[in-house]
Image (tube, rainbow, N blue to C red):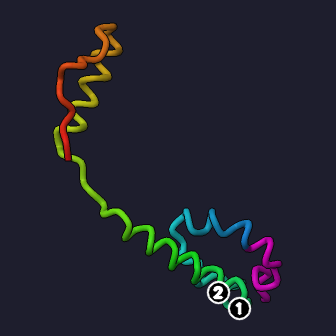
Amino acid sequence: MIDDRKKMSCAAFQAQLPELIGSGADAASHPHIQSCELCRALLADLETIAEAARQLLPIVEPPDELWEHIESAIKKESSGAGPDLTEPVPST
């Protein structure tokens, strides 16, 4: 059985690439990548760009109180009380 994904055009593969990457699938194992040097280079460039972007700003976990503050603000707004602008927002 021949995998039709090997025969797909670069345009068709590249149209699927955002969904493939977004799904968390291993795009490098896609049959088209195995047979297409151009798309393999494109994927390598995208991975390099993504890694550089991750290094620009460190991932910071919000403080535990933040979600409680958000929930409280939503409840106040839903009850018609409006947001409490004097209450400080937790900082990271």
Q: Is residue 35 left or right of residue 77?
A: right
Image quadrant holding the N terminus, namely bottom right
Report the amino acid beneath label 1.
Answer: Glu
Q: Which mark is residue 41?
A: 2
For image coordinates 72% across by 87% down, the residue present is 38
Q: Which residues are magenta?
A: 1-13
For image coordinates 80% across by 72% down, the residue present is 11
Magenta residue check for 2: yes
Where 69 falls versus 50 (above or below)? Answer: above
Where 84 falls versus 56 (above or below)? Answer: above
Q: Which mark is residue 60?
A: none
Query: In the figure, residue 84 lies in which quadrant?
Result: top left
Of 32 and 42, the residue lying toward us? 42
Q: Position of residue 77 (x, y in %)?
A: 33, 15
Reading the image, the residue beneath label 1 is 37
Q: Position of residue 43 (x, y in %)?
A: 61, 80
Q: Secondary structure at mark 1?
A: helix
Q: Position of residue 88 (x, y in %)?
A: 18, 28
For image coordinates 57% across by 75% down, the residue present is 46
Please count the marks in the image: 2
| Label 2, residues with CA under 10 Å away: few <14, some 14-19, many ≥20 | few
